[in-house]
Amino acid sequence: MDLKNTFKSRIRENKIGSDIYMAQIDNYTILTDTISKPVGKRFVQFYLCTKGRASFHFKNESLRVMNEGNSLLLFHPEIDIPINISLSKKSKLVIFVIAIQKLEDIFSKHKDKLPLLIQNNYTKFYHEKPLSIQEKLIISQLEDFTLDQEFENHYLTLKLHEFLLYYFSSNSSTSSYHLPIKDEKFIRKIYEIKEFLMENIASPPTLKELSESTNLSEYKIKEGFKKIYGKSISHFILDTKLEIGKEKLNLKVKQVQEIAYDLGYENPSHFIEAFKKKYGITPKQWMMK
């Protein structure tokens, strides 16, 4: 069954036998696209966000958001987990779906590398990690290739095998966020905190205020935020301010001092200092590039 989508994302689908399915989705529109497809419990699902952001909707009404440059692995041997995604505007997503038996065959001599297989029994697994440079390269090669139809599936199979080798060989040494699906409510709260911070970036709430509004302890907020986004809240706020500042500088509409005030800096020199530390040049030099 083909993917169902509400708008008109560009979708390239490849089915390799009954065990492997691939989709490359490019939502080039200015609207969020909702995409769905039934998937049986015998399949392992990989989601690779190469641009923008994707939101995953689960049966228990929980939500998981994945940002650009991250991958998500889903597997549950007892229940079906259908593809149910909201792909944000100007976003791209690659999907690999492979039968667990096929995955086991590929790693027949290295089953210890498969965290989904414990003592020869399949176990539910939910895993998010940043895409490595090698994995990003493989994905880019999937986007840019032209072959005769008879060779296309063979090429895609080879690339999938190559991706899986890099993915599982790096899993043990890659620092990543890893929580079971049952913690989705907590994850959603952390995501809401991040969205609230972005909406109020010029005057962000304190950790105490976030704790009171979410009914989460300050410790849980700090730990959860860092696990999911890979940085502390203060680091996230600083990075976001500087990214917004960079975009405003690119517009060349306001002066550096005005932009600093817009971002909540009481002293523009603090903005200039932080910007230079991150990007290697001053805001004024950036504007003149």
Image (cartoon, rainbow, N blue to C red):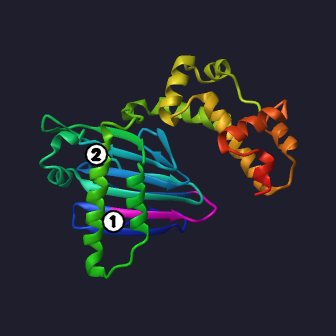
Residue to which mark 2 is pinned: 168
Res. 233 image quadrant: top right
Residue to which mark 1 is pinned: 1
| Distance between the alpha carbons at the discs numbered 2 and 1 | 28 Å
Question: Of tags 2 and 1, which is closer to the observer?
Answer: 2
Report the side of 146 relative to 265 (left or right): left
- Who is closer to the viewer here, 56 or 158? 158
What kind of residue is marked 1?
Answer: Met
Res. 38 image quadrant: bottom left
Let me know if residue 254 is in the magenta part.
no
- Who is closer to the viewer here, 29 or 207? 207
What kind of residue is marked 2?
Answer: Phe
**Are the residues tagged 2 and 1 within 8 Å (C-beta)?**
no
- Who is closer to the viewer here, 197 or 280? 280
Residue 212 appears in the picture as rendered = yes
Query: Label 1: how many residues lie within 10 Å, few (<14), some (14-19) or many (20+)?
Result: few
Q: Give the range drawn in magenta.
A: 22-32
66 in relation to 179, above or below: below
225 in relation to 146, above or below: above
Q: Position of residue 60 (x, y in %)?
A: 42, 38
Secondary structure under the numbered disc 2 in the rendered image: helix
170 in relation to 250, above or below: above
Q: Give the residue displayed 38% in from the left and 57% down from the top.
A: 95
Q: Where is residue 175 in the image (x, y as percent from the top left)?
A: 40, 35
Placement of the C terminus among the 4 image quadrants: bottom right
Q: Position of residue 137 (x, y in %)?
A: 41, 59
Q: Give the residue displayed 25% in from the left and 71% down from the top.
A: 154
Let me know if residue 31 is in the magenta part.
yes
Q: Give the residue displayed 50% in from the left and 59% down from the top.
A: 92
* Label disc, if present, on residue 261 of the rendered structure: none
